[in-house]
Image (tube, rainbow, N blue to C red):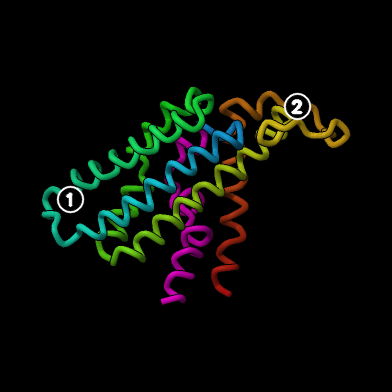
């Protein structure tokens, strides 16, 4: 069982990362990665929703009629997304003003439905919870990696904290906090991960 969970987390974080390998969740990866704080909150929302949706779908998999399973899954996702929206509004209203519209769109995030349909509907609750958590953390890691580069190069800050002036050997690139910057960074990191991960996966 320990080996199974280790494989689930290795796949979700690296070998089958939902962004790099499955090319899912791209819209939010591009939309909120100009700041690390925004990316962390979005990552929390997707991880929370994916993990608990997978757990719930797995627990109910033998009771959901096949012909309406997609509708039920979307309903479950919507409930957890509403919880996430309430939590972010209460805990970080400033962040909510920036990412609030995108939080609502978590309902349409293909990562969540993909894991519910592809894994949770065929496996037991705890492995499904682990799978959802791993994929959510893999998604979050990608967002934070992109955001850290974009925020540092675009604003000269990390988590809103100014970097020491002597470390800013580059000029602050406005393009890095604009939509093209997100496309460039996602493309570069995806290329790098695809070039490196297959070799690691064979070991």
- Checking the image for residue 8, the label placed there is none
Q: 191 or 16: which is nearer to us?
A: 16
Left or right for 170, reference 135: right
* Magenta stretch contains residue 21: yes
Q: Which residues are magenta?
A: 1-30
Question: What percent of the width, then of the height, locates residue 188?
Answer: 62, 44
> Which element is circle 1 on?
helix
- Checking the image for residue 172, the label placed there is 2
- The residue carrying pointer 2 sits among few (fewer than 14), some (14 to 19) or many (20 or more) residues within 10 Å by Cα, namely some
Question: What percent of the width, then of the height, locates residue 24?
Answer: 42, 46
Total number of numbered discs in the rendering? 2
Question: What percent of the width, then of the height, locates residue 110?
Answer: 36, 44
Do the residues under discs 1 and 2 have CB atoms within 8 angstroms?
no
Image quadrant for the C terminus?
Answer: bottom right
Q: Looking at the picture, does residue 192 appear above or below residue 153?
A: below
Q: Badge 1 is on which residue?
A: 69
Q: Quadrant of residue 104?
A: top left
Left or right for 195, reference 104: right
* Magenta stretch contains residue 26: yes
Q: Looking at the picture, does residue 135 appear above or below residue 202?
A: above
**Which of pointers 1 and 2 indicates the residue nearer the eye?**
1
- Residue drawn at the location 53% of the way across and 24% of the way down: 94
């Amino acid at each position: 069982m320990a080996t199974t969970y280790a494989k689930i987390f290795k796949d979700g974080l690296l070998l089958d990362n939902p962004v790099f390998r499955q090319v899912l969740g791209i819209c939010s990866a591009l939309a909120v990665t100009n700041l690390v704080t925004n990316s962390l909150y979005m990552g929390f929302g997707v991880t929370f929703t994916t993990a608990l949706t997978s757990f719930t779908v797995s627990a109910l998999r033998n009771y959901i009629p096949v012909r309406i399973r997609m509708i039920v899954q979307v309903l479950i996702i919507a409930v957890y997304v509403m919880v996430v929206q309430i939590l972010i509004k209460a805990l970080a209203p400033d962040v909510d003003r920036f990412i609030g519209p995108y939080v609502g769109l978590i309902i349409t995030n293909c990562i969540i439905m993909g894991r519910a349909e592809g894994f949770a509907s065929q496996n037991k609750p705890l492995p499904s919870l682990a799978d959802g958590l791993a994929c959510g953390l893999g998604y979050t890691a990608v967002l934070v990696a992109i955001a850290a580069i974009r925020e540092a190069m675009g604003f000269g800050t990390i988590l809103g904290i100014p970097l020491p002036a002597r470390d800013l050997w580059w000029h602050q690139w406005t393009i890095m906090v604009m939509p093209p910057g997100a496309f460039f960074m996602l493309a570069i990191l995806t290329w790098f991960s695809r070039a490196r991960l297959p070799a690691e996966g064979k070991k």
